[in-house]
Image: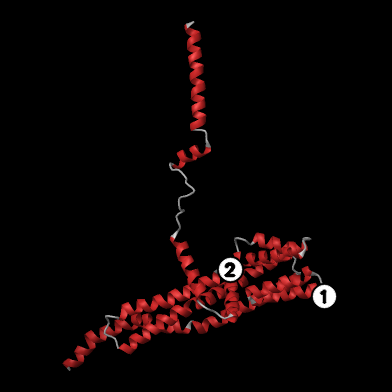
Amino acid sequence: MTLILSVGVFLLMVVLLTLVGTRMYVRPKAAIDRVVDTTFDSNEPVPVHPSLVFRDLLQKLGNLIPASPKDVSVMQRRLIRAGFRNEKALRYLYGAKAVLAIGLPLLMVLMVANSSADPSNKFIAVVASAAVGFFGPNEYIRTAAKRRQKEISRGLPNALDLMVVCVESGLGLDQAIVQVSKELEHAHPDISEEFALMNLELKAGKRRIEALRNLADRSASEDLKKLVAVLIQADKFGTGVAQSLRAHADYMRVQARQIAEEKAAKLGVKLVFPIFFCILPSLFVVTVGPVVVKIIRELIPMMNNM
């Protein structure tokens, strides 16, 4: 009897503990609360990162600055060529110009307030800082666009060789562009991004010639424009794409060799000034210095004693 009572109590305790554990610990919310040691309330405000606040401030300031449609189209094109394709990038740019055009003059005023410089020079410094703050973002965008064009031109020979291999192996031009975009994603991300955008335009229903022209217009790279012209001509006249690409690849190799030879020929002239201003003075100090010291120590006292 005692054994039966003990088993019954044990089973009752097991059932009770199982029910309590299921109600209190097996629920997903309770498990998440135990892991993160906190409770989530949907009514609590989500913390915002300071960079997002600053970005929102730039956007609001950019919305307040008026701009002509012509300037908007030009700056939008420059931003795209620099790799900034966010739809709010133009407003961020205008906001940055406003912040720098106001902040830099204020900082310059604080710097020159206690200086003993001429008041006209102080005024020129403040005006120059305002000009730098207003036109500085434009120069940054222009520099970023040029740097991106150089990166595209640098990665284009590898992309062209890979495209030739893909086309000669049996792939179509569109599939070859997709494959090149995938293969060069890490080695040359800029040209891979351009080819990926061209593939998206083709999927959206644009004609291949229009997508190629948009590719050349987005990047503004001369080498890429030449490649686009070759592909458009091959598509128009029905010539072999592989043959055209291989001929253009040979042309680019010859052009790269000529550019390297030109830079090597200019190297001797460019080294004249570093040699004259950096190497020759140290060479004179090493070779002529001991002689000058010996003359000063021995010859000049000897001449004075005579």
Identified by mark 2, the residue type is Glu
Query: Which residue is at 75% across, 72% downward?
Result: 209
Please state the horizontal and vertical placement of residue 112, each as a whole percent of the image.
Answer: 31, 81
Instruction: Locate residue 62 relative to residue 305 in the image: left or right.
Output: right
The kind of secondary structure element at disc 2 is loop
What is the residue that sits farthest to the top in this orientation? 1
What is the residue that sits farthest to the left in this orientation? 305
What is the residue that sits farthest to the bottom in this orientation? 306
Please state the horizontal and vertical placement of residue 190, each as a whole percent of the image.
Answer: 60, 67
Instruction: Locate residue 132 relative to residue 232 in the image: left or right.
Output: left
Q: Nearer the viewer, residue 162 or 194?
A: 194
Q: Which of 196 and 187 is in front in this view?
A: 196
Question: Mark 1: few, some, or many residues within 10 Å (few <14, many ≥20)?
Answer: few
Please state the horizontal and vertical placement of residue 277, each as a whole percent of the image.
Answer: 41, 83
Question: Mark 2: few, some, or many residues within 10 Å (few <14, many ≥20)?
Answer: few
* Marked residue nearer the N-terminal end (2 or 1): 2
> Badge 2 is on which residue?
87
Please state the horizontal and vertical placement of residue 284, each as a whole percent of the image.
Answer: 36, 83
Q: On screen, 219 above or below 266?
A: above
Query: Which residue is at 50% across, 21% downward?
Result: 14
